[in-house]
Amino acid sequence: MIQPDSSCAVTVNGISVRVPPGASVAAALVAAGTLCTRRSVTGQMRFAFCGIGQCQECRVSIDGQPHRLACRTSCKEGMHIVTGGEG
């Protein structure tokens, strides 16, 4: 029997990706090939370091709200994620 698709679709910097239910936004960033959450003051690419949101390196904008922690936020259908840089 074919199971219905239980994944959810999100966009990362305009790129549509599907992730399993309960996947973190950080996982969606990896699925989209975006390994940059923000830029440092000197322009260096930054990405999730600790994986639990303590280091604050995973801050992204989600549905227009800035400074959301990608490691601690679960994906929801239709979510729009914007990072601070390509990569």
Image (cartoon, rainbow, N blue to C red):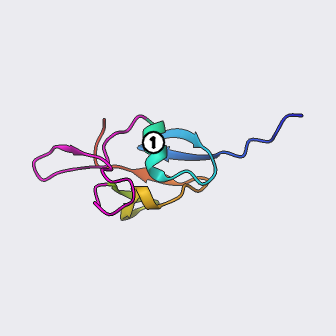
In this picture, residue 61 sits left or right of residue 78: left
Residue 39 is one of the magenta-drawn residues: yes
- Report the residue marked by disc 1: 14
* Along the line of sight, the residue nearer the viewer: 1 or 77: 1
Q: Position of residue 12 (x, y in %)?
A: 45, 44
Residue at (42%, 62%) from the top-left corner? Answer: 64
Which corner quadrant holds the C terminus? top left
Q: Position of residue 51 (x, y in %)?
A: 38, 53
56 shown above or below 43 = below
How many neighbours does mark 1 have within 10 angstroms: few (below 14), some (14-19), or many (20 or more)? few
Residue at (55%, 55%) from the top-left corner? Answer: 75
Bounds of the magenta segment: 33-57
Q: Taken as a whole, is the magenta stretch helix, strand or loop?
A: loop
Q: Position of residue 85 (x, y in %)?
A: 28, 43
Report the amino acid beneath label 1: Gly
Using the rendered view, name the quadrant where residue 7 is placed. Answer: top right
* Disc 1, SS: loop
Residue at (33%, 50%) from the top-left corner? Answer: 48
